[in-house]
Image: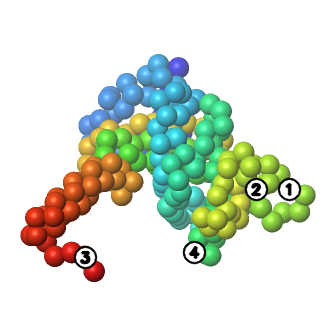
């Protein structure tokens, strides 16, 4: 079965570019791979559950792409089933460009990056917006299921994403970066060791006592 991701993204212009740069045969082998890449498996579920951010791309009425960052606690983007994602969308910069774009074109692209391990996952899908303020709506049930923390920021909507295809990128050119949360297990033992050394030095009279 041809890869769904290639079916959606290998347009005639893309194929022409592949031919121009000498990668058309390689791209064709990729496109005809036995991996359909249309349903999320265990590998994708585990990867998505560990992420605390991703990039969301939408398309405006004028045809321009728009990319925004979304972040939260690890796992805030949830896999509901093999073809459905959901997340609580917090109030942002109040420009509403992403949600406005979705009113005219529901296509989205998500890019999730694991910087320390240099892994990257791309997803294509169609998004549905569920406003929290809509009277008699379904948002409260979704927020309960997603366990959205309203104390972190006001939740304005829930986005459901019907996944059409996904693909794993190669690790080239991904610079390893580490968040404070990822570094904490390494930093805490050092801080404890430093505190113990300072306490020992104070006992020996080498460090003045703290005020």
Q: Which of marks 4 and 1 is nearer the N terminus?
A: 4
Q: In this view, does 211 lie above or below 70?
A: below
What's the coloring here?
A: rainbow
Kindly identify the residue that appears in the image at 36 percent across and 58 percent down.
Answer: 180
Image side of residue 85 versus residue 68, left or right = right
Against 151, is 142 above or below? above
Q: Is residue 43 left or right of 84 when viewed as pictured?
A: left
Toward the viewer: 140 or 198?
Answer: 198
Q: In x, y percent, where is residue 54?
A: 48, 53
- Which residue in the structure is indicated by mark 4? 93
Report whether residue 153 is seen: yes
Q: Residue 210 carries which label?
A: 3
The residue identified by callout 1 is 137
**Separation (CA) of disc 1 from disc 2:** 8 Å
Q: What residue appears at the point 90 percent right and 58 percent down from the top-left corner?
A: 136
10 Å crowding of disc 1: few (<14), some (14-19), many (20+): few
Residue 109 seen by the camera = no
């Amino acid at each position: 079965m041809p890869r769904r991701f290639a079916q959606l993204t290998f347009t005639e212009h893309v194929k022409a570019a592949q031919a121009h740069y000498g990668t058309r045969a390689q791209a064709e082998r990729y496109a005809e791979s036995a991996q359909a890449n249309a349903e999320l498996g265990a590998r994708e579920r585990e990867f998505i559950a560990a992420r605390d951010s991703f990039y969301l791309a939408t398309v405006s009425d004028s045809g321009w792409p728009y990319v925004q960052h979304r972040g939260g606690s690890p796992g805030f983007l949830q896999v509901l089933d093999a073809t459905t994602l959901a997340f609580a969308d917090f109030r942002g910069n109040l420009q509403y460009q992403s949600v406005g774009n979705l009113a005219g074109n529901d296509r989205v692209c998500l890019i999730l990056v694991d910087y320390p391990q240099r892994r990257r996952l791309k997803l294509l899908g169609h998004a549905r917006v569920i406003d929290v303020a809509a009277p008699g709506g379904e948002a409260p049930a979704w927020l309960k299921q997603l366990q959205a923390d309203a104390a972190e920021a006001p939740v304005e909507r829930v986005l459901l994403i019907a996944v059409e295809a996904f693909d794993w990128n190669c690790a080239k050119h991904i610079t390893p970066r580490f968040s404070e949360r990822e570094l904490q297990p390494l930093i805490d033992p050092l801080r404890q060791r430093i505190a113990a050394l300072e306490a020992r030095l104070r006992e020996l009279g080498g460090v003045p006592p703290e005020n």
